[in-house]
Image (spheres, rainbow, N blue to C red):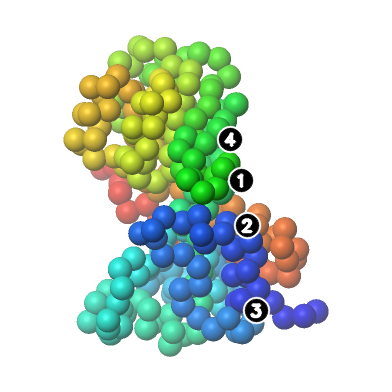
C-alpha cells in the first residue's frame, strides 16, 4: 500500500475546505511540518497546546489536524521564551506536523456551521452572510425549527444537547421562536445579519457584553452555548473528510486532552 504523506492529507482537506474561503485575519493550511513526511496516524483536535502535542506523541500520531490555528500574527522569532514559540519548537523537534482548517471549514458547504445546524435540527437552512466572491459559501446559517417553541424551551434543548450545567440567554424566555440564526465559535460579527434576516433567536458561542446589549435592544434573542461546545465536533468532520479520501489508510485519534478550559463551579 502506498504511503500517505502529510501533503496528501493537506490536499484532501484543502479540497474539501479551500483555504481561499478563510478570513483575511486567519491562518490556515499546513502550518508546521514537511509535506513529504509519511503519516499513518493523525490526532484530531479543536485546539493545539503542549498537552495535545504530547498526546500525539503518546498515541503515535505523526500529524495533528486542528480547527483553531496557531500563529495568528507574523512571527520574527521562534524561541522558547514564549508559549507559542515553545509549542512550535516542541512540534518540530518531535517531527509532528500541524494542519489547520478554521474559518474556511466554518464557511464551506457541508462544513462546521452546516453540522451545527443539523445538530440543532434546523430545516430550510441557508447561508447567513454569503462570501462576496463565492455564492453558496459564507458565515453562519439561518433556518427554521420544525415547529414553533419558546426561547426557554429552545435553551433547555441546547442545554441538554451540549450537556451544559446551565445556559445563558438574552431576551424574553417566553417569546415564541422559530426562525433561528447560528454561528459556530465567536459569532458577534454575525449579529447584524441575524437581525437583518429577521431571526427570532441567534445561537452562538461567545459574544461580548456590549454586543449582546445592542442585539437585545434590536429585539434579537440570544442563546449563549459557549465557544468550545459549538466547535468540538470539528473532530468528527475531520474524520469524515479523511475517511472519504483515504478509506482505512489512516488511524484516527480524537483528542482527550483538549477539554473545555471554562468550567462551572
Q: Which image quarter: residue 173?
A: top left
Residue at x 65%, y 54% (from the top left corner): 240
Percent coordinates x, y for residue 21 in the rendering = 50, 55
x and y, in percent, of residue 7 in the image: 61, 76
Q: Name the residue under label 3.
A: 5
Residue denoted by label 2: 16
Residue, far front:
133
Would you place residue 179 above or below residue 86 in this image?
Answer: above
- Cβ atoms at labels 3 and 4 below 8 Å apart: no
Instruction: Find disc 1 in the rendering and name its residue.
Output: 110
Q: How many labels does the image show?
A: 4
Q: Which label lies toward us, 4 or 2?
A: 2
- How would you rate the neighbour count of disc 1 (Cα within 10 Å): few for under 14, some for 14-19, many for 20 or more? some
Give the alpha-carbon distance from disc 3 to disc 1, as whole Å.
25 Å
Measuring 65% from the left and 65% from the top, which residue is drawn there? 12
* Sequence order check, earlier mark of 2 and 1: 2
Residue placed under numbered mark 4 in the picture: 118
Element marked by disc 2: helix
In this image, 49 relative to 147: left or right?
left
Residue at the image point whose x is 48% and y is 18% from the top: 178
Q: Note whether 112 is above or below 214 in the view shown.
A: below
- Report, in whole angstroms, how far the alpha carbon at label 4 lies from the one at label 2: 19 Å
Q: Is mark 3 on a helix, strand or loop?
A: loop
**Is the Cβ of the residue at disc 3 closer than 8 Å to that at disc 2?**
no
Nearer the viewer's eye, disc 1 or disc 4?
A: 1
Amino acid at each position: 500500500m502506498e504511503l500517505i504523506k502529510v501533503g496528501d492529507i493537506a490536499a484532501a482537506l484543502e479540497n474539501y475546505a479551500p483555504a481561499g474561503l478563510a478570513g483575511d485575519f486567519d491562518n490556515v493550511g499546513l502550518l508546521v511540518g514537511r509535506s513529504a513526511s509519511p503519516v499513518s496516524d493523525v490526532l484530531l483536535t479543536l485546539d493545539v497546546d503542549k498537552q495535545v502535542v504530547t498526546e500525539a506523541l503518546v498515541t503515535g500520531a505523526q500529524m495533528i489536524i486542528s480547527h483553531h490555528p496557531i500563529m495568528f500574527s507574523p512571527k520574527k522569532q521562534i524561541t522558547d521564551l514564549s508559549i507559542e514559540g515553545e509549542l512550535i519548537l516542541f512540534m518540530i523537534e518531535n517531527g509532528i506536523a500541524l494542519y489547520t482548517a478554521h474559518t474556511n471549514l466554518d464557511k464551506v458547504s457541508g462544513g462546521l456551521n452546516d453540522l451545527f445546524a443539523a445538530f440543532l435540527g434546523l430545516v430550510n437552512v441557508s447561508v447567513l452572510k454569503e462570501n462576496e466572491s463565492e455564492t453558496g459559501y459564507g458565515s453562519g446559517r439561518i433556518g427554521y425549527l420544525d415547529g414553533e417553541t419558546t426561547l426557554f424551551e429552545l435553551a433547555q434543548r441546547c442545554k441538554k444537547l451540549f450537556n451544559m450545567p446551565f445556559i445563558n440567554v438574552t431576551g424574553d424566555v417566553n417569546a415564541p421562536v422559530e426562525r433561528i440564526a447560528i454561528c459556530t465559535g465567536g459569532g458577534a460579527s454575525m449579529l447584524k445579519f441575524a437581525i437583518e434576516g429577521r431571526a427570532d433567536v441567534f445561537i452562538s458561542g461567545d459574544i461580548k457584553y456590549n454586543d449582546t446589549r445592542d442585539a437585545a435592544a434590536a429585539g434579537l434573542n440570544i442563546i449563549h452555548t459557549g465557544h468550545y461546545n459549538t466547535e468540538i465536533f470539528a473532530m468528527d468532520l475531520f474524520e469524515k473528510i479523511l475517511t472519504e479520501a483515504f478509506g482505512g489508510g489512516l488511524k484516527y485519534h480524537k483528542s482527550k486532552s483538549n477539554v473545555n478550559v471554562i468550567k462551572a463551579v
